[in-house]
Image (cartoon, grey):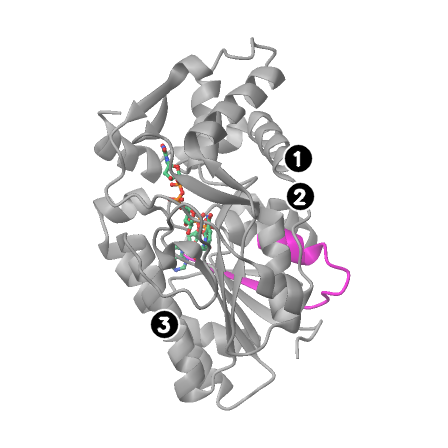
Amino acid sequence: MFSSQSTMLVTGGAGFIGSNFIHYLFRQPDFEGSVVNFDKLTYAGNLENLSEIEEQYGGKRYLFEKGDICDSEKVSAVFAKYGVDTVVNFAAESHVDRSIHGPAEFIQTNIVGTFTLLEAARASWAGRKDVLFHHVSTDEVFGSLGESDFFHENTSYDPRSPYSASKAASDHLVSAYFHTYGLPVTISNCSNNYGPYHFPEKLIPLMILNMQEEKLLPVYGDGKNIRDWLFVEDHCSAIYAILKKGQRGETYNIGGENEWTNINLVNRLCEIVAEKKSKPKDHYKKLINYVNDRPGHDRRYAINCDKIKNELGWKRSVTFEEGLDRTVSWYLANLQWIDRVKSGAYRQWIEKNYEAR
Ligand code: NAD
Ligand code: TDX
């Protein structure tokens, strides 16, 4: 029962996927509603990602509220002020390495924050069925795969990092609110995203940036861990399909059907960047540097996304070659964006934790 006039609370809308999602929404001809972007603006949140949206729709169909999803008073006030009827919950601490160095923030935002949002939705919506709480989650909740199997919607949860454990807990809470209170919810578990506005601590942007600066390219362990990569716009279109057609109480896996070992991906990125910067094909490959493995490093992720394809008619539209090309071009054209997001809090954290790298 999605209404094109919906008033959507997008939490974490200033981050990587959230900001791409808001851009995506305003490009949809069948979306005529408004978006309230609720974001704490941690090191990972950057309002500059939405400057064009602010210019075009600010104060009308696009509203920004700075706030913490753990702040129940503020969250409830936002529900009441705007008459929110749809929540898309992106807000989270999202980086596995950070969760290893300091799990507390992950427990707070990912678990307590999701709980706080659920409580506000339950109180504000009291019995309504024309509303939806969509929770954005990850394939990492399922743990690590062997060589040939896939994550399905009914795969048992087996999280291995503080990040994935906190996301698993939040998924369980969302599901519990459906069964216990009848809150209309949907959940999606997506594989690794890549694309514009990806914070340069994550593998793909970090590698592009290090190549740009002729710095070493740190590959964890033997480099043979496998991830299933999806262009961020395809994740956004999947979420939009769930908002419009998803069954309440259901979970949908989203993936790229696109498995790469980290080392093969880094090698491919080296070639693309070399080509764009008119360097010899192997110029950047000599920077590849195998470093200590991430503790508890999941070996392989691979999503079976037949359910969302068959039931909601979603399909991926961007090939990996095209997506990587667009991503590398975007980063090389937006080096100032990288300088800005890397200054301040992030720079201090990286110096403290990765001095030895
Ligand atoms: P991100 O780190 O780039 O952005 C997170 C955003 O949430 C930031 O804008 C940050 O300021 C905001 N935020 C953090 N704590 C907050 C709080 N307490 N209150 C309000 N806002 C807060 O993350 P992302 O990569 O865009 O991921 C978004 C969501 O998608 C997360 O829930 C993540 O678990 C999930 N996800 C990510 C991927 C991926 O590959 N990046 C894949 C699957 C699922
Ligand atoms: O410097 C690096 N070297 C390296 O080898 C980094 C940053 C990562 N890696 C490896 C670890 C992983 O196997 O590359 C792979 C990808 O790492 P990340 O970019 O940190 O992503 P990942 O840990 O797979 O998690 C991402 O996808 C699932 C997001 O950060 C999560 O929020 C999402 O849930």
How packed mark 3 is, by other alpha carbons closer than 10 Å (few <14, some 14-19, many 20 or more), is: some
Q: Report whether the residue tagged 3 is closer than 8 Å to ligand 1.
A: no
- Residue drawn at 29 percent across, 44 percent down: 98
Task: Estimate the spatial distance between the alpha carbons at disc 1 and disc 2, rounded to whole Å.
Answer: 6 Å
Position of 55 relative to 251 (above/below): above
Q: Which residue is mark 2?
A: 318
In the picture, which quadrant includes the N terminus? bottom right
Q: Is residue 74 highlighted in magenta?
A: no
Pointers 1 and 2 in contact (C-beta within 8 Å): yes
Q: Position of residue 53 (x, y in %)?
A: 64, 51
- Residue nearest the observer in this picture, 14 or 67: 14
Task: Estimate the spatial distance between the alpha carbons at disc 3 and disc 2, rounded to whole Å.
Answer: 31 Å
In the picture, which quadrant includes the C terminus? top left
Q: Position of residue 318 (x, y in %)?
A: 66, 43
Q: Which residue is mark 1?
A: 322
Q: Which residue is mark 3?
A: 172
Position of 251 relative to 148 (above/below): below
Outermost residue on the bottom side: it is 127
Task: Give the magenta part as a residue range.
Answer: 21-40
Q: Is residue 22 highlighted in magenta?
A: yes
Q: Amino acid at mark 3?
A: His
